[in-house]
């Protein structure tokens, strides 16, 4: 086969903004005058910001999203290439320290519209009911100020909006099923199933992942090319850029890309008045708004609020508790690599396609609280080579040799719960970025429970790999995801925001992103972050103008609004379990 | 040139080549080492999207000029890269340029989005590291690194891998040796394994949009991929890097965490 069956693939068309292979945004985006006060200013249009801006626009609010990175045209800007996808990550300077420094950038930090949801692997397990009661049940960490039942309707909503492909019956946590069928297995999934079956461990095959197993509206199904974390050019893997942002623009939202917010401004009456930001030309601008929602994720959200310190809030805006920046969490993300005699070719299929949560809950027979999941991962050559540098200490001829065996290796990921600790934190460094804004300094230390959990979990994954028939098994310690550092709670002296994301200190300032999570379970946080955003949107809409004018703080649970979903969401399903 | 000199040059060149374990003889350099003879990712370029095709072809055809490193640093770094990822098994026309790729990253100031508190910025770390490598070469062999044989060069570099450099203590006071080692090796890996010739070598299918992969299970090749044809080889005699040993630890409980993104 020397020429493409349907002719050569042409370049993208001029004057057309493409999102995925088939989706085009052809409406002119609304532009607010810079001196015009809007209802909501959203800082960061990522996983949470993308969902929020869509819902608030649909509900008729004047809303502007400021995003530090670009508004991607996926056909022009993205490539099927590891090294060429560097620009998807937050690569602005940050400083890391502590006993166990956390690698950032490509590992966990997005930049551009869609944020981290552009380069996530798109595993979308829900948190378990026990995750919301970690302190009550296990005496560690902290309880959430809400229960699983409060978030459940939003899990169901987002699983259809993304949508999520997975089995009709998912047995762990609160059992449920998925409306879109599971994906076929790749080589790594087969190995996870084989190893787990030998050991009597249940596996969920083909999901849950926010990747289309069948075409959906103007989004094609997955083509199994394996470049999920380099950005899905196909448009099969969900990011808020393709699932929610187009609907937000159609409903009158404005997204200003390449705009870096420097501080949130506080007025004389103790309410925020908007934000100051640097526009794409580096000019300092102000956007006035009746309320501000910070959606910058676990590093940039605390950094922005700390940088917004002002008289009355010398320790950082909305930081009367002193907890802002603290209780930062990453998950244990050890990669366990096994070499098989037969070929695997793990670059095919999405890295995320099978998992087990059999070890998720606290088990009294183990000497640590909480647990972990085991998931498929599919490192491409550069990532795999770096893993071999760590896992085998390979270099030189040893590296060349193990790399020639790339197609014989499979990789499984541990996803282990690390508890929230006060000393794991985001602070301001003395170093400044190109705008002169102090950068974040991130300190991270593993504690006793974390170390025991990682040791046990890592050995369990290795056991699965051996059981699947591997002849050599090695592992790379590392971390995955970032949450916390602006935690929600009911006690204003111990947390930054309440259960709706409203800061305890300032009634028209909200935080909505992964930074508000009090604990993290051993589920990938993406679904929970987007579900929380949909819930916060329902709350804001139910409060109406009170958010802009009153300092009263209703804690009433808002009604679930299903009519705010992007089009094409409803009418799909499996027989639901009650 | 005398026959004797030619013979000794040949011997020196051969001693840098991988060995066929069956015969004990060096394997001749190839255009494409690895177990997938005839496989070509670039042969699939008509099936790639425009943006990807442009980027990959540019990577192969337009080697970036040196703009960050000074000439004497370039020679030294080239010698270092030749041992961090040796290419003696590739023929002269198919060696992948590494130093230019690292230079471009540092010239463009393309950072990973974080800096270890105890590390200087990446460019400075590379410059300091080269100074220290030169100091170790002088300490161990009384000669510049570039004048050493491959075994001696490996011996110098292995002191970094093992976290026990015998010289350059002024440099190691400013950055931990293990972090420098990982920075150096990762920068080399990022350039080499981004090249389509390296993909052909390891049998990686490369870009697959919009063409797709259709054979997901049992390691089956796509219609345009080729079957594996393994051959035995071992590292050259004049090398130390053929046997894998763990890098000495960088955290207080011994583990060396990886830094890439997988999940």
Image: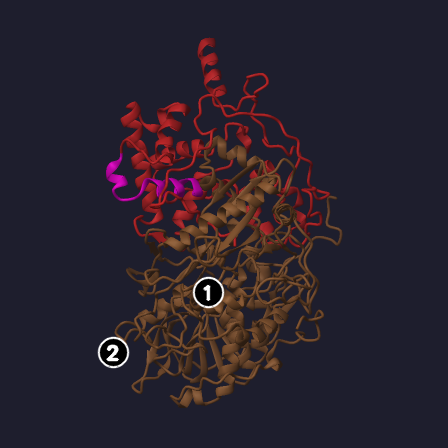
Q: Residue at x 57, y 63 (%)?
A: A125
- The percent position of residue A43, horizontal first and vertical second, equals 43, 73
Please report the residue visible at 33 percent of the width from the left and 54 percent of the height from the top.
Answer: A97
Q: Is residue A478 visible?
A: no
Q: Nearer the viewer, residue A293 or B43?
A: A293
In reply to whether residue B177 is colored magenta, the answer given is yes
Q: Compared to A457, does A74 lie above or below?
A: below
Residue B66 visible in the current orientation = yes
Q: Position of residue B191 (x, y in %)?
A: 48, 42
Residue A322 vertical placement versus A373 (above, below): below
Q: Label for residue A311?
A: 2
Crowd tier of the residue under label 2, counting other residues whose Cα lies within 10 Å: few below 14, some 14–19, many 20 or above: few
**Quarter of the picture holding the N terminus of chain B:** top left
Number of marks drawn: 2
Question: N-terminal of the two: label 1 or label 2?
Answer: 1
Q: Is residue A576 magenta?
A: no
Q: What span is colored magenta in the figure?
A: B168-187
Residue A121, x across and y down, in percent: 56, 57
Instruction: Please give the residue where the numbered disc 1 appears in the rendered image.
Output: A69
The picture places residue B20, in percent across and down from the top left corner, at: 57, 21
Judge by depth and name the residue closer to the eye, B164 or A236.
Answer: B164
According to the colouring, which chain is brown? A
Q: Which image quarter: residue A170?
A: bottom right
The subunit carrying tag 2 is A
The chain containing the residue under callout 1 comes to A
Determine the colour of chain B.
red
Q: What is the C-alpha distance between the residues marked 1 and 2?
A: 30 Å
């Amino acid at each position: 086969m020397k020429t493409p069956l349907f002719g050569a693939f042409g370049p993208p068309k001029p004057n057309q903004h493409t999102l995925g292979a088939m989706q085009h945004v052809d409406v002119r985006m609304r532009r607010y005058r810079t001196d015009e006060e809007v209802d909501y200013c959203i800082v960061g249009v990522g996983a949470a910001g993308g969902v929020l801006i869509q819902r608030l626009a649909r509900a008729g609010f004047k809303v502007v999203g400021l995003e530090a990175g670009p508004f991607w045209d996926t056909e022009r800007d993205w490539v099927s290439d590891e090294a060429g996808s560097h620009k998807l990550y937050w690569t602005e300077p940050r400083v890391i320290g502590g006993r166990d420094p956390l690698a950032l950038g490509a590992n966990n930090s997005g930049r551009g519209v869609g944020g981290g949801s552009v380069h996530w692997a798109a595993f979308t397990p829900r948190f378990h009911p026990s995750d919301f009661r970690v302190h009550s049940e296990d005496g560690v960490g902290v309880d959430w100020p809400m229960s699983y039942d409060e978030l459940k309707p939003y899990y169901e909503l987002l699983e259809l909006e993304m949508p999520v492909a997975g089995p009709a019956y998912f047995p762990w946590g609160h059992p449920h099923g998925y409306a879109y069928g599971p994906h076929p297995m790749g080589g790594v999934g087969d190995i996870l199933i084989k190893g787990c079956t030998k050991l009597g461990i249940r596996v969920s095959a083909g999901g849950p992942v926010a990747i289309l197993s069948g075409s959906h509206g103007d989004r094609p199904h997955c083509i199994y090319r394996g470049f999920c974390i380099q950005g899905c050019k196909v448009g099969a893997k969900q990011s808020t850029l393709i699932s929610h942002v187009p609907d937000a623009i159609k409903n009158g939202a404005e997204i200003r890309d390449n705009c870096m917010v420097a501080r949130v401004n506080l007025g004389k009456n103790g309410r925020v008045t908007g934000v100051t930001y640097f526009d794409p030309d580096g000019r300092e601008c102000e956007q006035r708004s009746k309320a501000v929602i910070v959606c910058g994720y676990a590093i940039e959200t605390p950094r922005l609020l700390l940088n917004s310190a002002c008289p009355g809030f010398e320790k950082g805006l909305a930081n009367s508790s002193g907890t802002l920046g603290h209780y930062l969490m990453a998950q244990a993300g050890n990669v366990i690599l096994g070499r098989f005699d037969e070929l695997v070719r793990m670059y095919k299929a999405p890295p995320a396609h099978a998992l087990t949560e059999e070890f998720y809950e606290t088990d009294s027979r183990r000497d640590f609280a909480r647990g972990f999941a085991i998931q498929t991962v599919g490192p491409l050559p550069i990532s795999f080579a770096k893993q071999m540098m760590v896992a085998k200490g390979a270099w030189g001829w040893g590296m060349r040799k193990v790399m020639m065996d790339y197609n014989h290796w499979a990789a499984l990921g541990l996803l282990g719960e690390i508890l929230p600790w006060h000393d794991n934190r985001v602070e301001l460094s003395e170093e400044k970025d190109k705008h002169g804004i102090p950068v974040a300094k991130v300190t991270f230390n593993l504690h006793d429970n974390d170390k025991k959990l990682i040791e046990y979990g890592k050995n369990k994954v290795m056991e699965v790999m051996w059981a699947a028939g591997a002849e050599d098994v090695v592992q790379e310690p590392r971390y995955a995801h970032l949450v916390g550092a602006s935690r929600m709670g009911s006690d204003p002296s111990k947390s930054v925001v309440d259960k709706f994301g409203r800061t305890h200190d300032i009634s028209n300032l909200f935080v909505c992103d992964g930074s508000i999570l009090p604990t993290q379970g051993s589920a990938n946080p993406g679904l929970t972050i987007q579900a929380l955003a949909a819930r916060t949107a329902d709350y804001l809409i139910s409060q109406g103008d009170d958010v802009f004018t009153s300092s009263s703080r209703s804690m009433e649970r808002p009604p679930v609004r299903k009519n705010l979903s992007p089009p094409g969401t409803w009418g799909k399903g499996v027989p639901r379990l009650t | 040139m005398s026959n004797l000199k030619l013979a000794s040059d040949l011997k020196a060149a051969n001693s840098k080549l991988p060995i066929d374990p069956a015969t004990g003889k060096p394997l001749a350099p190839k255009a494409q080492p690895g177990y997938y003879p005839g496989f070509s990712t670039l042969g699939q370029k008509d099936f790639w999207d425009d943006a990807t095709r442009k980027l990959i072809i540019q990577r192969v055809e337009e080697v970036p000029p040196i703009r960050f490193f000074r000439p004497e640093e370039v020679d030294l770094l080239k010698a270092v890269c030749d041992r961090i990822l040796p290419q003696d098994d590739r023929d002269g026309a198919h060696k992948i340029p590494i130093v230019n790729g690292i230079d471009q990253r540092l010239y463009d100031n393309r950072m990973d989005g974080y800096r270890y508190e105890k590390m200087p910025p990446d460019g400075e770390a590379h410059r300091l590291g080269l100074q220290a490598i030169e100091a170790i070469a002088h300490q161990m062999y009384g000669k510049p690194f570039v004048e050493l044989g491959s075994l001696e060069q490996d011996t110098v570099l292995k002191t970094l891998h093992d976290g026990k450099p015998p010289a350059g203590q002024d440099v190691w006071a400013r950055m931990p040796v293990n972090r420098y080692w990982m920075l150096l090796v990762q920068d080399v890996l990022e350039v080499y394994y981004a090249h389509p010739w390296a993909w052909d070598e390891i049998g990686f299918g490369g870009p697959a949009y919009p063409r797709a992969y259709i054979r997901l299970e049992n390691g089956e090749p796509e219609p345009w991929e080729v079957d594996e044809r393994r051959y035995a080889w071992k590292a050259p005699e004049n090398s130390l890097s053929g046997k894998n040993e763990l890098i000495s630890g960088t955290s207080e409980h011994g583990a060396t965490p990886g830094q890439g993104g997988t999940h």
